[in-house]
Amino acid sequence: MGNLDRNKNLDQDNCNCDGQCNCGCHEISFDESFYEDPVVKRLCFMYRELVLHDGFGDLQVLVKILKRGQKEVIIKSGKEYRYVVDVPGELNKWR
């Protein structure tokens, strides 16, 4: 997946903590390569299809831990799309 920049925030607009808490909303944002990832592209595509659909729909994202620093990401919305992704080294050492 894309490179993480831990100095920028991802969801500061929805946080009321003024950066003084441990909620994590000020820790992670993504560089442009994040959006080139096949999992992110599929998820964005499925979201857009559901929003533009003339009716209702369901979107699920499941993440399962695998061995050797990998995770399985399953995106469900009518069909299932399965991906095995490597956990970035920076996140792997938190275990």
Image (cartoon, rainbow, N blue to C red):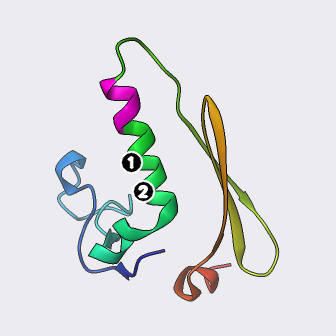
Q: Is residue 31 left or right of residue 61?
A: left
- Residue 47, visible in the rendered structure: yes
Q: Residue furthest right?
A: 67
Tell me the residue at 38%/69% (across/down).
36
Residue 11: give its label.
none
Kind of residue sitting beneath label 2 = Lys
Tell me the residue at 53%/25% (across/down).
58
Tell me the residue at 23%/46% (across/down).
14
Q: Is residue 57 left or right of residue 93?
A: left
Q: Residue at label 2?
A: 41
SS category of the residue bearing label 1: helix
Q: Position of residue 32 (x, y in %)?
A: 27, 74
Nearest the viewer among 59 and 9 is 59
Q: CA distance from mark 2 to mark 1?
A: 5 Å
Q: Position of residue 40 (x, y in %)?
A: 44, 58
Q: Quadrant of residue 5?
A: bottom left
- The dominant secondary structure in magenta is helix
Tell me the residue at 58%/88% (across/down).
89
What is the span of residues highlighted in magenta in the rendered image?
Answer: 48-52
Q: Is residue 49 above or below residue 56?
A: below
Q: Quadrant of residue 23?
A: bottom left
Q: Position of residue 46 (x, y in %)?
A: 45, 39
Q: Is residue 71 left or right of residue 94?
A: right
* Circle 2/circle 1 CB separation < 8 Å: yes
Residue 44: give its label.
1
Please state, as top left, top right, bottom left or bottom right, where the C terminus lies in the image: bottom right
- Callout 1: few (<14), some (14-19), or many (20+) C-alpha neighbours within 10 Å? few
SS category of the residue bearing label 2: helix
- Residue 31, visible in the rendered structure: no
